Amino acid sequence: MSYLRRSSWLAFAAAVCLAPAQPQQPLSFEVASVRPAGSRPPQSPFPSAGKITGGPGTGDPTRITYTWVLVRSLLMNAFGVPIDQISGSDWVMGQEGRFDISANVPAGTTKSQANEMLLNLLKERFHLAYHREKKDFDMYALVIAKGGPKLKDAAPADGPPQAAPQPGTIARPSARDRDGFPQLAAGIGGFEGVTVNGITRQTFRKATMQVLLNSFKVSMGGSRFVDKTGLTGKYDFTLAFSRAGLPQPTGLFYGRGAPPPPEEIDNPSGGPTLFSALEKQLGLKLEKSRTQLDVIVVDHMDKQPTAN
């Protein structure tokens, strides 16, 4: 390489290095329509928090629709956090603010990118402003109890899969066996529970430890869970425990005021606590600790979005 050519190449390289970096454009939907929703759902029955259809990971990945969706649900999706990691005014956290949003999603968008697009839409159309604060949360690790797990490998399917309920209809609860547990077909993954006289009875089919942890999120709202059992199989089992001290599905507690920790609750119903039931019935155990997580504090959010 000649001296002149080498000098020219070095000058070009230096110019590239010194050139200012181009600001990265925020992720955004290709087209988005935002409209306030009415006070009544579009049909009945309808999910109380609204419904989100389409988007990445679904059969319609380039179109996402939020129907009669609460503001807090939009925020939960935008930030990817549960409801207890969102804090704001009564309007932000209540039942009044509802919107219908339709958006075109660029091809190849991931779910996390779609959530970021929603967040940027809320900033643009609602002038969302927020900050983050740290808060302590209960953390429970699921481990194997002394004596080992008492789980049975999942049985294969013994017939055709059950038909899914038609859209807009309420799924019928399963029939119960003589002990009060829901009867679920073998080989169909998932769980179902029923609570009678303060005792919850759950049936699990083809369930992983993550499915069991997901059931805890319903029974022990506000806590975080991590699987440390090392169990990677799929299992069939049942679990029965007292609901004394545990949140109701609505998030309200039995009795008045916040109850003591669920592992310290007496059981007037006579049933075992969730902690005791896990150990005696499944050979598993929950170990409690504390963890710090970010809470999104909404400082401002317009009640009316800017025009489409």
Image (tube, helix red, strand yellow):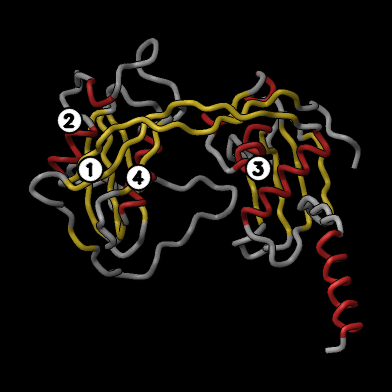
Name the residue carrying label 3: 78
Depth order, front residue of 43/39: 39
Graded by Cα atoms within 10 Å as few (under 14), some (14 to 19) or many (20 or more), the crowding at tag 2 reads many
Label 1 vs 2, first from the N-terminus: 1
Type of the residue with mark 2? Pro
Number of disc labels: 4
Name the residue carrying label 4: 226
Separation (CA) of disc 3 from disc 1: 35 Å
- In the image, farthest residue toward the left: 147
Graded by Cα atoms within 10 Å as few (under 14), some (14 to 19) or many (20 or more), the crowding at tag 1 reads some
The quadrant in which residue 44 appears is top right
Q: Which mark is residue 272?
A: 2
Type of the residue with mark 3? Ala
Label 3 vs 1, first from the N-terminus: 3
Relative height, residue 116 to residue 5 (above, below): above
Separation (CA) of disc 3 from disc 2: 39 Å
Give the position of the C terminus as an image quadrant. Answer: top right
Depth order, front residue of 91/47: 91
Location of residue 127 in the rendering, given as x and y in whole percent from the top left corner: 81, 32
At horizontal 71% and vertical 23% (from top left) the residue drawn is 299
Residue contact at pointers 3 and 1, CB within 8 angstroms: no
Relative height, residue 260 to residue 32 (above, below): above
- In the image, farthest residue toward the top: 256
Location of residue 154 in the rendering, given as x and y in whole percent from the top left corner: 24, 63
Name the residue carrying label 1: 239
